[in-house]
Amino acid sequence: MPKRLRRCKECGEYTLRTDKCPHCGGELEVPHPHRFSPEDPYGEYRRRMKRRVWEKKFGSPAGGSSE
C-alpha cells in the first residue's frame, strides 16, 4: 500500500494532496521514516558525514581519533 499522507515543509499541516499544501501552498514531503535494514549499504558514509558535521559544530571529541 503506498503512503498517501503528506506533511507540509512550511507549516507542518498534514494532507492527502500530492502537489502542494492546501493551507499555505508549500512543498509537501512524506512524513514516514525510511525502512530499516541491518545490512545498511550506506551506513558507513552516513556516520562519517554525521561525525564531520559534529566536529565542525563542536570540535573533535576529547581523546577521540578522527579519520
Image (cartoon, rainbow, N blue to C red):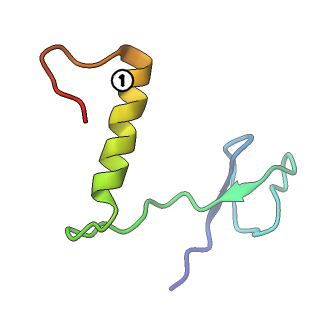
Q: Going by the image, does 12 lie left or right of 57?
A: right
**Residue at the image point whose x is 17% and y is 27% from the top:** 65
Question: Who's the residue at 77% across and 54% down the image?
Answer: 27
Residue 66 position, x and y percent, is: 23, 30
Please identify the residue farthest to the bottom as the structure is shown.
1
Q: Is residue 9 above or below residue 64?
A: below
Q: Residue at x 36, y 69 (%)?
A: 35
Identify the image quadrant of the C terminus.
Answer: top left
Identity of the residue furthest to the front in this view: 67
| 22 displayed left or right of 28 | right
Residue 40, by quadrant, is bottom left
Residue 47 in percent (x, y) is at 31, 46
**Residue 53 or residue 21, whichever sits in front:** 53
Q: Residue 44: give x, y in percent of width and height.
A: 28, 54
Q: Position of residue 1 (x, y in %)?
A: 50, 86
- Amino acid type, mark 1: Glu
Q: Residue at x 36, y 23 (%)?
A: 55
Placement of 54 over or under 62, stated as above or below: below
Which element is circle 1 on?
Answer: helix
The residue under label 1 is 55
Q: Nearer the viewer, residue 56 or 6?
A: 56
Q: Please, is residue 62 above or below residue 27 in the view?
A: above
In this view, 18 is above or below 53: below
What is the crowding at mark 1: few (fewer than 14 residues within 10 Å), some, or many (at least 20)?
few
